[in-house]
Amino acid sequence: MKTSDFNFELPPELIAQDPLEDRASSRLLVLDRESGAVSHRHFYNITEYLRPVDCLVLNNTRVIPARLYGHREGTGALIEILLLKRRGNNIWETLVRPGKKARPGTRIVFGDGLMTGEVVDVVEEGNRLIRFSYEGVFEEILDRLGQMPLPPYITHELKDKNRYQTVYAKYDGSAAAPTAGLHFTPELLEQVRQMGVRIAEVTLHVGLGTFRPVKVEDVTQHHMHSEFYQVDEAAARAIRETKAAHGRVICVGTTSCRTVESVAARFDGEVRPCSGWTEIFIYPGYQFRVLDGLITNFHLPESTLLMLVSALAGRERILAAYAEAVRERYRFFSFGDAMLII
């Protein structure tokens, strides 16, 4: 299995630059994973594909304004910092640009001295550990100084930070949004609940590793970066009860999928309350233990996310559906349209 097997042609103008005003009005491509049949709907039609015995799994992580701009102490050179993982008391693993001169001991000043950072170590793939110093509450300072870490393929300025958050986001910690959930509105979620569909909220703090390109030609040699997840008793019970009632577990986004599959791998197919770090990499040949259906966006060529959806529906069917989406002028990637694989 080669990385190039997951390539496809995408006209640049189909990369969505802005979110739609109405979240639920995005288009929805429905793919039957058994037959490969495709139908074209809108996201607000999602309730027509859910049953009262089903369970919808949401990732309630919240994106932090993780992109910071500062100046190197002494030279005044501009430095861009992207927070990746909290590694200890005021210490974060970060991506630094330009990184070559950010050696241990380098000091960076943010917001006219409101906060400073010192590079304390260089770790895997050249990431820097930075210790931050400030007065007050870190989250409040970050909210003042930080920007939303939009993917590089989005070049438009985001006017409303909340549009890169799901309406059910709760727990700070992600460097990127679980974008499949951006299509839900509070009203649509309430409609789902009124149907009798269980809602299970899990947490996986999305790191940039999910979106890093696969640099090896042999898919099996790619290594995923670890991400923190947490599943509480209420979510675990909802998923277990759904399975016992022969309902379907439908994950909203690849991050929710990776969370429940990580937990099931840990407990021999059962979902129990727990927390931990996962490096799970799902690609064709993977046998799903929990997931029965997936709500997702359209992903980048040769990405681990495209490999995950191919594991669920088959590479040929996914690529055929993507070709249809291109012909039908669907909007791709983070602010784009949605896909239901069921």
Image: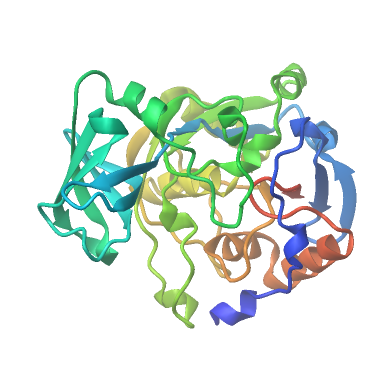
Q: How many marks overall?
A: 0
Asked whether, in this view, residue 11 is left or right of residue 244, the answer is right
* Above or below: residue 120 compared with residue 49: below
Indicate left or right for 16 with 80 as reference.
right
Percent x, y of residue 290 = 55, 46
Residue ID at (63%, 37%): 181
Q: Position of residue 23 (x, y in %)?
A: 74, 32
Q: Quadrant of residue 326?
A: bottom right
Q: Quadrant of residue 222?
A: bottom left
Of 263 and 140, nearer the camera is 140
Relative to 129, does residue 50 appear above or below in the rendering? above
Please identify the residue farthest to the left as the structure is shown. 105
In this picture, residue 130 sits left or right of residue 336: left
User: Quadrant of the rendered structure where residue 276 is?
Assistant: top left
Looking at the rendered image, the quarter that the N terminus falls into is: bottom right
Asked if residue 289 can be seen in this view, the reply is yes
Q: Is residue 4 above or below residue 138?
A: below
Question: Is residue 250 visible from the viewing direction of this image?
Answer: no
- Expressed as whole percent of the image width and height from the top left, the position of residue 156 reads 64, 47
